[in-house]
Amino acid sequence: SQQGEEDPQALSIQEGENATMNCSYKTSINNLQWYRQNSGRGLVHLILIRSNEREKHSGRLRVTLDTSKKSSSLLITASRAADTASYFCATDAGGNDMRFGAGTRLTVKP
Amino acid sequence: DAGITQSPRYKITETGRQVTLMCHQTWSHSYMFWYRQDLGHGLRLIYYSAAADITDKGEVPDGYVVSRSKTENFPLTLESATRSQTSVYFCASSSRTPRYTEAFFGQGTRLTVV
């Protein structure tokens, strides 16, 4: 079964608004990662947060991690049309592989 | 060119045929992964490899075979293709275990089994 589950499945916002996506996972992790996938392309790594970290920033991205609730959130501030993509969380599930959720499809309208 | 490349990008095959998807990376990354992506399921791990000659099953390994005789190559073989294996396949690599670092993905192979 999949380790991560993103919520919502789809999100549509206007340019300039903030977008928040959530990820819940099932087992203990060493880290949690977020990836972006543009239509028809491979995944691109965005940010990695370790299990002992609670918040991390990278440009317009802010990621939080709550290990007690087994959940993470990705916030994209001041969104742009170019942010339109699918976003996935991935975890190591305590092992040496990497498992993904089903993703959140974000549409940013100009 | 440096990076991770998959070939072919598109493939149509018939049910029952054997087909091999190729993955090549130029970074000498230790770890390599194969995923399939289907609508509603996100990415599901098929197999992964921690080093040459070391492979492990992922979530959905049935019907697939992998090998890793060289660090840079990680081919995925469908021994007898079925329609349910119609999917987009992604290869990825990482320098260390995903416990510590990110992965880099290829552009994907769209496989259609008719």
Image (cartoon, coloured by chain):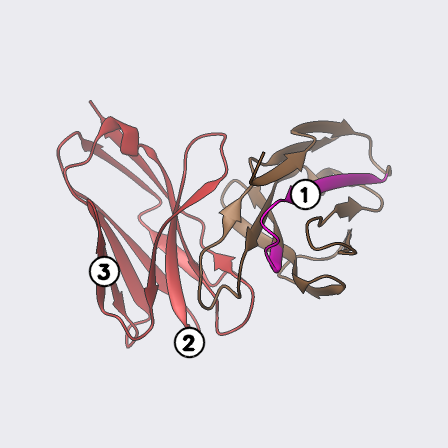
Chain colours: A red, B brown
Which stretch did the figure color magenta? Answer: B18-32
Q: Which element is circle 2 on?
A: loop
The disc placed on residue A44 is none
- Would residue A82 be counted in the magenta stretch? no
Pair 2/1: label in front: 1
Type of amino acid under label 2: Ser
Residue B41 in sight from this viewpoint: no
Q: Which residue bears the numbered disc 3?
A: A56
Are labels 3 and 1 assigned to the same chain? no
Q: Chain of mark 2?
A: A
Q: Residue at x 45, y 56 (%)?
A: B102
Q: Residue at x 51, y 61 (%)?
A: A98
Locate the C terminus of chain A and report the quarter of the image it occupies.
top left
Query: Split into 4 quadrants, where in the image is the N terminus of chain A?
Result: bottom right
Q: Which residue is mark 1?
A: B23
Residues B60 and B66: in front is B66
Q: Quadrant of residue A84?
A: top left
Q: Are marks 2 and 1 in contact (CB under 8 Å)?
A: no
Q: Label 2 belongs to which residue?
A: A28
